[in-house]
């Protein structure tokens, strides 16, 4: 019985360590992007990205992004793609690509405004 619990635990720990050491990231490229078609990609050496991210979200998090930040991020992304997956609208919205445009404060969340 102990072996049945130890094997899945060891597999999960190895997957987490591999993801961390290889810096694997899921990057969602939306339709109409600069160079790539709409897809979800698994990339290596994605140090500038969060675990699930998009080039647009990465550019909006920077204090002073360049005008062609999206194009530069997509070019860099194209060189590090390991696996191409279908585009996921839900994952793209999860990355919050237009967060700076919304500029919502904590008190202005939908849950808070629905209570009032």
Image: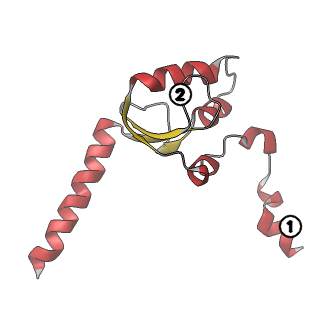
Which residue is painted at 67% across and 17% down in the image? 66
Residue 112: which quarter of the image?
Answer: bottom right
Q: In the structure shown, which secondary structural element does the residue marked by tag 1 occupy?
A: helix
* Label 2 vs label 1, nearer the camera: 2
Q: Which mark is residue 49?
A: none
Can you give x and y, in whole percent of width and height, for residue 2 in the image? Answer: 11, 78
Can you give x and y, in whole percent of width and height, for residue 50 in the image? Answer: 50, 41
Which residue is painted at 62% across and 24% down in the image? 70
- Residue 81 lies left or right of residue 6; in this view the side is right
Q: Which mark is residue 36?
A: 2
Above or below residue 53? Residue 4 is below
Mark 2 neighbour density, 10 Å: few (under 14) some (14–19) many (20 or more): some
Q: Nearer the viewer, residue 54 or 99?
A: 54
**The C terminus lies in which quarter of the figure?**
bottom right
Q: Earlier in the sequence, mark 2 or mark 1?
A: 2
**The N terminus lies in which quarter of the figure?**
bottom left
Q: In the structure shown, which secondary structural element does the residue marked by tag 2 occupy?
A: loop
Which residue is painted at 60% across and 46% down in the image? 92
Q: Which mark is residue 113?
A: 1
Measure how far apart labels 2 and 1 are at the Cα level: 38 Å
Can you give x and y, in whole percent of width and height, for residue 13 in the image? Answer: 24, 57
Q: Nearer the viewer, residue 27 or 100?
A: 27
Above or below residue 72? Residue 81 is below
């Amino acid at each position: 019985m102990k072996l049945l619990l130890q094997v899945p635990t060891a597999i999960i720990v190895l997957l987490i360590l591999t993801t961390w050491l290889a810096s694997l990231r899921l990057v969602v490229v939306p339709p109409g992007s600069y160079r790539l078609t709409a897809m979800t990609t698994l990339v290596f050496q994605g140090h500038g990205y969060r675990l699930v991210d998009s080039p647009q979200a990465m550019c909006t998090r920077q204090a002073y992004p360049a005008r062609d930040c999206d194009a530069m991020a997509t070019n860099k992304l194209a060189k590090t793609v390991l696996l191409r997956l279908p585009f996921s609208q839900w994952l793209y919205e999860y990355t919050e690509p237009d967060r700076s445009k919304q500029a919502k404060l904590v008190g202005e969340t939908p849950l808070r405004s629905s209570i009032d």
